[in-house]
Amino acid sequence: MNARRPLIASACAVAAALVSSPVDTLPDENPVLERLRAVFPSAAISDVRIVGNLRWVSSEELKLAIARRIRGGFFGVDIAAVRESALAVPWVRDVSVRRVWPGELRVTVVEERPIAHWAGGGLITDRGTLLPVRQGAGEGGLPVFEGPREAIPVLREGLREFSAIFDGIGGGIARLTRSAAGNWTLEFEDGVRLVFRDEQKRRVRRFAAVYLSTLIGRRKSIDRIDLRYPNGFAVRWRGGEDAHSRVQG
């Protein structure tokens, strides 16, 4: 009995040091972990705690996804399998799993970050993934992407590029469309639309200077600006009149 006490005390000390460590430092073949399993064969998981700023996935959904992996006891549970099951839940971007003595399994979740609505339904993340939206949930203040599904990566990059160019002009980008033929329509929150082709994207930056210096004061009267001209652009006013100008450079 007395001979066993030092072993238990030693095991408890090791447990306290290890069970709060990240999963990467506690592989299943770790010899100390094997020892803890032997010393505490009946140590159970008494609580599964989901941690994270969750909006698109619920704690209940995550617990259900990992439920079949919660077996083998506190030291016997397959941490990597728990993480894998949690990662399979839509809207979950990253997961870390830890044992917290004496019986907690802590699952820390990072969700995907939406950057745009998809015109066909769903949300686009900053990694270009199209994900479903839970019924009743929404995300305001995001632009809309429209086009063929294969255009999503190009639209994502376009949003980054054009937002930087037009930051503070027109109140932001409300809608970004790219057709299969490579035609773009950029619609600002104030309703002004900018039209151009793939090969004219480099002209958008030059045009921004013209827009800021000569057109922004009349933006409430502008319907559409068309850059699809060899040496300039056309402005369609909301009254129906068209006017042509040049973009230098």
Image (spheres, helix red, strand yellow):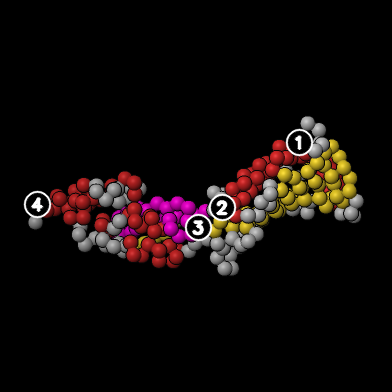
Which residue matches tag 3? 91
Task: Work out whether mark 3 precedes mark 1 in sequence or the reverse, and give the earlier one.
Answer: 3
Instruction: Give the number of the disc on residue 222.
Output: none
Q: Residue at point 65% right, 59% down?
A: 119
Identify the magenta region.
87-114
Q: Residue at point 73% right, 40% down?
A: 200
Q: Position of residue 206 (x, y in %)?
A: 76, 36
What distance separates the C-alpha of mark 2 from that of mark 4? 58 Å
* Residue contact between numbered discs 3 and 1, judged by CB atoms under 8 Å: no
Q: Amino acid at mark 1?
A: Arg
Q: Amino acid at mark 2?
A: Thr
Which residue matches tag 1? 206
- Label the magenta part by its dominant secondary structure: strand
Q: Amino acid at mark 3?
A: Trp
* Residue contact between numbered discs 2 and 4, judged by CB atoms under 8 Å: no
Q: Which quadrant would the C terminus be assigned to in this image? A: top right
Q: Which quadrant would the N terminus be assigned to in this image? A: bottom left
Task: Work out whether mark 4 precedes mark 1 in sequence or the reverse, and give the earlier one.
Answer: 4
- Asked whether 170 falls inside the magenta stretch, the response is no
**From the viewer's perspective, is 235 left or right of 189?**
right
Toward which corner of the image does residue 227 lie, by quadrant?
top right
Q: Position of residue 188 (x, y in %)?
A: 74, 51
Which residue matches tag 2? 125
Q: Amino acid at mark 4?
A: Ala
